[in-house]
Image: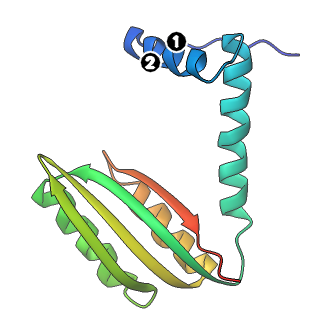
Amino acid sequence: MPIISLQITEDLLERFEKVRTSMGFSSKSDALRDAIANFIETHENLDNLKGYKIMAIHLVYPFRESLINMIAELFLKYRHVIKTTTDWRIADRKIELILTVGEAGIIKDFYQEIKSLKEMISSMHEIIID
């Protein structure tokens, strides 16, 4: 197996160690392999989305007018796939949930534009209705 090295802050290493230990990984390498596999799977799943989808997008970002204005512009651009939103302001952060319905490619474009905004924490999940 190839060996890789990386540099991280002390704070990130301490947080990683707490999670690694609590999840029962016997080594840093095992935990990192698992994290890398999850990272790849998440992005491959996003890349493979096709057809008509219902997706929930979750955002957490700093409550700043400039960022809120950029998000509002994206909401206007993709209004045809946004069905509803709800948001909360908690201290200096905003939490937003967005329900989208439409072609997967358009929803992915919206998500990619949203997540590229600086200081944005985001996730997207498919809602499956059987």
Q: Residue drawn at (74%, 37%), measured in percent from left and top? A: 37
Q: Is residue 67 left or right of residue 8?
A: left
Question: Mark 2 or 1 closer to N-term?
Answer: 1
Quarter occupied by the C terminus: bottom right
Check disc 1 and report the residue beneath it: 7
The secondary structure type at the circle numbered 1 is: loop
In the picture as drawn, the residue positioned furthest to the bottom comes out as 80
Quarter occupied by the N terminus: top right
Viewer-side residue, 63 vs 76: 63
Q: Position of residue 88 (x, y in %)?
A: 20, 62
Tell me the CA gap for discs 2 and 1. 14 Å
Q: Is residue 99 left or right of residue 34?
A: left
Q: Is residue 60 above or below residue 9?
A: below
- Looking at the rendered structure, the kind of residue marked 2 is Arg
Check disc 2 and report the residue beneath it: 15
Few, some or many residues within 10 Å of mark 2 (<14, 14–19, 20+)? few
Residue 73 tag number: none
Q: Residue drawn at (71%, 43%), measured in percent from left and top? A: 40
Q: Position of residue 102 (x, y in %)?
A: 56, 87
In the picture as drawn, the residue positioned furthest to the right comes out as 1
